[in-house]
Image (spheres, grey):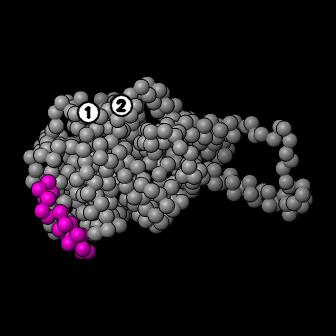
Amino acid sequence: MVEILFNSILYVFLFLTLYLEVFFLITFFEERLKLGAKSATGKLSYYPSVTIIVPCWNEEKTVSKTVESLLALRYPKDRLEIFVVDDGSTDKTWAVIQKFANNQQIKLFQKENGGKHTAVNFGIKNTTSELIGCLDADSFVDKDALHEIASAFNEDPDMMAAIPTIIIHEPKTILQKMQRTEYHTVAFFKRMLSPLDAITVTPGPFSFFRKEVFERIGLFKKAHNTEDMELALRMQSNHMRIRNVHTAHVYTSGPETLYKLYRQRLRWAYGGMKNTLDYRFMIFQRKYGILGMITLPLAFFGIFIFLYNFGFVVFHIVRGAMSKAVEISTVGLSFALPSADSFFFNTDFMSILAYVFLGLGMVIIWNGVRLAEGRFRPSMGIFYFITLYGIVAPIWLVRAIVNILFSRGTTWR
């Protein structure tokens, strides 16, 4: 009876997952004609004034490359200013950025440490530009990225924020290669959520806002160390349009070790759940469209669905292994090995469902890679993502749930 109940719950969860995969693929086929190459190849009819804020704390090794990538942007210099805000670094960050002190496009600021959101807010308060963007000090941008984003703002006067496509740059470790495919997949979903007005995060690497966003709804908040998620939800609750500009590419470095990845994803998972709880009034509310009916419920309950499915699979693997061990100890190894013939292909319901999930997942990965890279290129990162992500993700997801249950916060690093 208990097993029937667990199986029934699993079937419901799998149905919901399958429904969402098909839903996003249908959206993809509706949008596929708009997923071409860069759109802003020539001059823009209008170049809005832009300020890009680079908040940094102990980024002496990466901040120079970040700022240099901004100076290389293909955008009129008299319409672009760059604020580098040192948020009380304890290393040589302030000394390193002095190399830009005489550049007229760049303004350097130093303040007491207060967290990333205070550094960005400091920059917002000190600019009058029409568009305000942010770039993490461990990321760098494609030279046409701002051109693409400004073009999107020109095309859509109702758009209040724009987010780019983020790509893991030159992954070296297995975990970084896994993250590269993960980011490609995220790029696919962000692009599909964009026309549905269902984006839930404006990430630190190169998101842009009209200045009136901050004038109308206020500045960034600490928001459980995930201020980019909170602001996106605050915008959505005020029906402000957030659009993904998939042709604007930004490159970042993924955590190279499991511990660093765990710390980063724990903050993301915990912050995502806490912010969703803070904005729970939007869940299952039709006036918030796909965001309220699908995206937000998925952001919160999806973690539990993922962990339940993972636990179910692990349980049956362990039970099968124990059963096989008993069989081997009883009849010997030779009799325990499966026979191979033309009919050795598992056709039970769960196996067929697993093949369907894998097939749809590969379609999503395929198109995510094409969206981010311009064409599909097979890589070991795809294999690592398929085989490893489901194993390592429960580590930080379980801890995030524990932290919420026991009111424990997270730290940046």
> What range is drawn magenta here?
90-107
In the image, residue 100 lies in the stretch drawn in magenta:
yes
Query: Residue, x 21% and y 33% (percent of image)?
Result: 44
In depth, the one of 91 and 4 nearer the eye is 91
Q: Which residue does the numbered mark 1 point to in the structure image?
A: 42
At mark 2, the secondary structure is helix
- Name which of mark 2 and mark 1 comes first in the sequence: 1
Query: Residue, x 68% and y 36% (percent of image)?
Result: 352
What crowding class fits label 2: few (fewer than 14 Cα within 10 Å), some (14-19), or many (20 or more)?
A: some
Looking at the image, residue 309 sits to the left or right of residue 401; the answer is right
- Residue 230 image position (x, y, % from top left): 28, 48
Looking at the image, residue 342 sits to the left or right of residue 61; the answer is right
Residue 39, placed above or below residue 1:
above
- Residue 322 position by quadrant: bottom right
In depth, the one of 77 and 19 nearer the eye is 77
Looking at the image, residue 10 sits to the left or right of residue 256; the answer is right
Query: Residue, x 51% and y 46% (percent of image)?
Result: 305
Residue 196 is tagged as 2
In depth, the one of 192 and 311 nearer the eye is 192
- Residue 325 image position (x, y, % from top left): 80, 61
Query: Residue, x 35% and y 38% (percent of image)?
Result: 247
At mark 1, the secondary structure is loop
- Residue 53 image position (x, y, % from top left): 20, 54
**What's under tag 2, amino acid-wise?**
Leu
- Residue 24 image position (x, y, % from top left): 46, 33
| Rendered-image quadrant of the N terminus | top right
Residue 18, placed above or below residue 391:
above
- Residue 118 at least partly seen: no
- Residue 327 at least partly seen: yes
In whole angstroms, how far apart are the C-alphas of marks 2 and 1?
Answer: 28 Å
**What's under tag 1, amino acid-wise?**
Gly
